[in-house]
Image (cartoon, coloured by chain):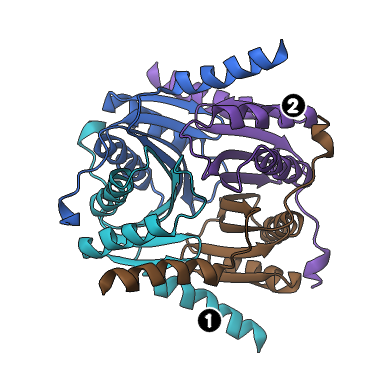
Chain colours: A purple, B blue, C brown, D cyan
Amino acid sequence: MAYSNLKTPASCYADFCMIPVGTGSPSISREVAEVQKVLKASGLYYKMHSAGTTVEGSWDEVMKVIGQAHSIVHQNGAVRVQSSMRVGSRTDKTQTADDKIKSVQDILARDEK
Amino acid sequence: MAYSNLKTPASCYADFCMIPVGTGSPSISREVAEVQKVLKASGLYYKMHSAGTTVEGSWDEVMKVIGQAHSIVHQNGAVRVQSSMRVGSRTDKTQTADDKIKSVQDILARDEK
Amino acid sequence: MAYSNLKTPASCYADFCMIPVGTGSPSISREVAEVQKVLKASGLYYKMHSAGTTVEGSWDEVMKVIGQAHSIVHQNGAVRVQSSMRVGSRTDKTQTADDKIKSVQDILARDEK
Amino acid sequence: MAYSNLKTPASCYADFCMIPVGTGSPSISREVAEVQKVLKASGLYYKMHSAGTTVEGSWDEVMKVIGQAHSIVHQNGAVRVQSSMRVGSRTDKTQTADDKIKSVQDILARDEK
């Protein structure tokens, strides 16, 4: 098989947490705010939570914007940037971030009856 | 130094996403619902989002409840369980999950003026 | 600033662990083997360890091959694929995977004297 | 069910990458070296690679030593420490780090014939 011709997934989500290394400050909220602006400019769906940000789109779009997020944090002075990511793709159905939460909440509501 | 006498951190957060492997179903919402019940029983602060759940407490409490979450998913039939975790501890100040989000939102609000 | 014009990093490493979900088997070595072939075909530096695989290159190259790895696992029958990734980029110097290990080993060797 | 009485898994592996935040230096090899000493003192099996360290043992032992690793990095001056972790437990069989690699290599060797 021609592995190098494989396409990347048409849709995925990535949940990522980005840490600038060696900045001299334990606070990272300034960097996170810049990353939110990069995400907003992408036009993709994204949502921040206390431990990261979830973004949805095609694999290429999602990875491009996270790479741009690394770049903006570098531009703002961090020589090293480290991210932790969870990425999921599925081919059986489309399920948004909200769908996933609702699916769990529905089960919990039924179990409580 | 006696490394084996080191204590674990008095407080931390962990954001985790747990995947049962080899269950035969791509849906994991049933398992995630069970994990929420384990978290509730722990008495710790926790909050689910679309890509995981954040839990706060002492290091030992947080790691115990995530281990119990692995065990409940095993009990429900998964012979293999895999988690992705982000864990943070800090000694300079106490910052809750809500504090972190507010800190970023405040910067974004100021920048928009 | 035109955030959407930001480039992605010229070099990075990603360490990833990919899990097919809902395959009915707890073993994932067949899928990991396929992923190694995709990595080999990319021409990038990569190295497997017991908990994942590290790959180095430009941001776009690295993310493309990991996306292709998701796709091959989908092609082989998994409707859902989940990855955990660590990604690092730095602008101050070039440091290979081997450099990083050597740097730690050198410190340990000095400390033992 | 009494969720709070659930035991944690008897065995697991964790692969972790620890980042001190706000130290003022992009290099983390000094901290990684200290963490290796903490792991050595634990008596558990562990192996460093370029993107993290894998440690094996009971859930409680593994999480204790990673918590101690956070503590040693705090003691050495980092007020904030962030870890990315992958954790796996399975009840169907015992598989060491070396077993996992060999299992993939065997498939690749067969496929090449």
Circle 1 packing at 10 Å, graded few (<14), some (14-19), many (20+), is few
Image quadrant assignment for residue C5 = top right
Q: At label 1, which amino acid type do we have?
A: Asp
Q: At label 2, which amino acid type do we have?
A: Lys
Residue D1 seen: no
Marks 1 and 2 close (CB-CB < 8 Å): no
The residue that disc 2 covers is A40
Q: Quadrant of the C terminus of chain B?
A: top right
Give how far across and how far down residue C88 sits, in percent: 59, 53
Going 65% across and 89% down the picture, which residue do you hit? D113
Mark 1 lies on a secondary structure that is helix
The answer to whether residue A55 is left or right of residue B29 is right
Residue B77 seen: yes
The answer to whether residue D21 is left or right of residue C1 is left
Same chain for mark 1 and mark 2? The answer is no
Give how far across and how far down residue B11 sits, in percent: 30, 32
Cα separation, mark 1 vs mark 2, equals 46 Å
The residue that disc 1 covers is D106
Q: Chain of mark 2?
A: A
Q: Compare residues D102 and B101 and report the one nearer the observer.
A: B101
Q: Compare residues A111 and B68 and report the one nearer the observer.
A: B68
Give how far across and how far down residue B93 sits, in percent: 35, 26
Residue farthest along the top direction in this orientation: B113
Is residue C16 depicted above or below B64 in this figure?
below
Is residue C21 depicted above or below A112 in this figure?
below
Image quadrant assignment for residue A57 = top right
